[in-house]
Image (cartoon, rainbow, N blue to C red):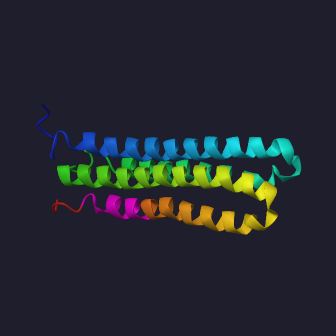
Amino acid sequence: MSSEFSGDETAPFFGFLGAAAALVFSCMGAAYGTAKSGVGVASMGVMRPELVMKSIVPVVMAGVLGIYGLIIAVIISTGINPKAKSYYLFDGYAHLSSGLACGLAGLSAGMAIGIVGDAGVRANAQQPKLFVGMILILIFAEALALYGLIVGIILSSRAGQSRAD
C-alpha cells in the first residue's frame, strides 16, 4: 500500500462503476429504442416508402440517449484522479449515483422511445394527422433522459465536497 495516497482505497472503484453504468445503461436504452423504432420504420416502409425519412425521428432521438451517458461518463472519469487530489468514498458514491441516475433514466427513456416510435410510425403511415402527437410523446420520453442527465451533472458536481483538503 502506497503511503502517499490519501483518501479511501476503494473509492475509485465506485467512481469508475458510475462512469460505466452511465454509458452502459444509456447505450442499452439507445440500442433498444433504435432497434424497436427501426423495426417499425422498416415495417411501415414496405407499404409507404415515401414516409421513411419522416419516420426516422424516433431512431435519431433514441441515438441521442447514448450521448447523454457519454457526457456523464467523461465528467465522472475526469473527476477521478486520486494522485492529484484526495478521493474519498463520498466522492465515489457521488459519482456512482450520478452514473446510475443518468444511465437508468436513459434506459427507461429508450424503452419509451422504442415502444412509442414503433407504434407511432406504423400509425402515422395509416393516419398522417398522428405525426405531431407522436413527436410530442417522443419529446416527453426524451425529456426523461434529460432529467437524468441534469441530475447526474448535479450529483457529479457534489464529488470533492466531502472534506476540506
Is residue 82 left or right of 61 when viewed as pictured? left
Q: Write down the quadrant of residue 3 in the picture.
A: top left
95 in magenta: no
Residue 159, how many percent across, how many down? 27, 58
Residue 150, how many percent across, how many down? 43, 64
In the picture, which quadrant includes the N terminus? top left
- Magenta stretch bounds: 150-160
Q: Write down the quadrant of residue 8 in the picture.
A: top left
Tell me if residue 7 comes above or below residue 134 in the rendering: above
- Residue 150, can we see it? yes
Tell me if residue 135 comes above or below residue 44 in the rendering: below
Viewer-nearest residue: 40 or 68:
40
Residue 160, how many percent across, how many down? 25, 58
Seen at 73% across and 53% down, the residue is 121
In the picture, which quadrant includes the C terminus? bottom left
Counting the numbered discs, the total is: 0
Is residue 139 left or right of 16 when viewed as pictured? right
